[in-house]
């Protein structure tokens, strides 16, 4: 049996930082992240557009489910969170992530279970710039114990603008697990999936540490063309 894995508690500093970010979001948000309507962080019409529609992919040899397509309102909300610090919008994306988790669970047989959710690491530069880790905030809302098990093993380039093969090479060997898995069932969590290269690297690192990775989930996945 895998060792018991307990959720990582929030420090007082993390709680204060999150509270300040949420207050700033409430005070300064002036336009809808989805359509630009003045006076609200997200209008009712745009919030209604975030109804989940799970998308299935494969990453690192395991199933990957995303709750939404990364376009339109979903893309606007994620950008508002990551670029403008509007962390209160995280709540509007949790149903999409929950739908992805439910789809993942539906594909598991009784021999497998999810003991822990593991957020994809955020780069040090992104954390310094934002003050929070988006995959971690999302993972905390799944109701499954969350652990920050993966850490960067080396620096990587910004993935934006890179093709599928370049993305794979860029993140190859980029993560390492901080503790042994002892067979515990792990589910990788990310915010947006483009090619799946980052999730695949997270799967590899967890497997190397002895975790049984059942799959990966994300809020959104970029549409495939052609």
Image: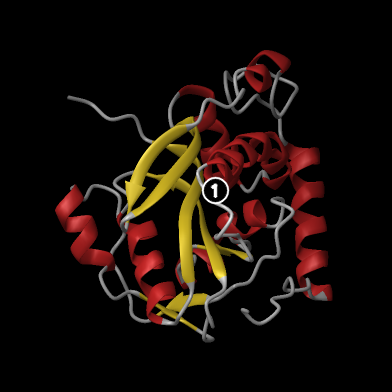
Report whether 45 appears left or right of 159.
right
Local SS, label 1: helix
> Disc count in the image?
1
Residue at horizontal 62 percent and vertical 22 percent from the top: 51
* Residue lying farthest to the bottom in this orientation: 179
Residue 117 place in picture, x, y as percent = 60, 62
Residue at horizontal 29 percent and vertical 46 percent from the top: 195
Q: Quadrant of residue 32?
A: top right
* Residue lying farthest to the top in this orientation: 45
Report whether 225 appears left or right of 138.
left
Q: Quadrant of residue 19?
A: bottom right
Q: Quadrant of residue 99?
A: top right
Residue marked by disc 1 = 82
Q: Nearer the viewer, residue 167 or 139?
A: 139
Residue 127 place in picture, x, y as percent = 54, 66
Residue at horizontal 79 percent and vertical 75 percent from the top: 11
């Amino acid at each position: 049996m895998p060792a018991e894995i307990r959720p990582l508690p929030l420090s007082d500093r993390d709680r204060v930082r999150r509270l300040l970010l949420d207050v700033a979001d409430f005070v300064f948000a002036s336009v809808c992240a989805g359509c630009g309507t003045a006076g609200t962080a997200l209008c009712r019409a745009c919030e209604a557009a975030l109804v989940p529609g799970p998308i299935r992919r494969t990453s690192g040899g395991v199933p990957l489910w995303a709750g939404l397509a990364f376009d339109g309102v979903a893309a606007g909300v994620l950008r508002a969170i990551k670029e403008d610090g509007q962390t209160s919008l995280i709540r509007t994306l949790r149903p999409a992530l929950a739908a992805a988790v439910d789809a993942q669970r539906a594909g598991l047989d009784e021999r497998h279970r999810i003991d822990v959710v593991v957020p994809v690491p955020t780069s040090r530069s992104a954390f310094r710039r934002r003050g929070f880790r988006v995959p971690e905030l999302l993972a905390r809302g799944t109701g499954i114990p969350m652990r920050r098990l993966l850490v960067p093993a080396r620096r990587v380039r910004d993935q934006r603008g890179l093709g599928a093969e370049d993305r794979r090479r860029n993140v190859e060997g980029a993560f390492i697990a901080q503790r042994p898995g002892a067979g515990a069932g792990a589910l990788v969590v990310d915010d947006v999936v483009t090619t799946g290269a980052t999730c695949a690297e997270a799967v590899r690192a967890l497997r190397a540490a002895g975790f049984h990775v059942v799959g990966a989930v994300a809020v959104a996945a970029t549409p495939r063309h052609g």
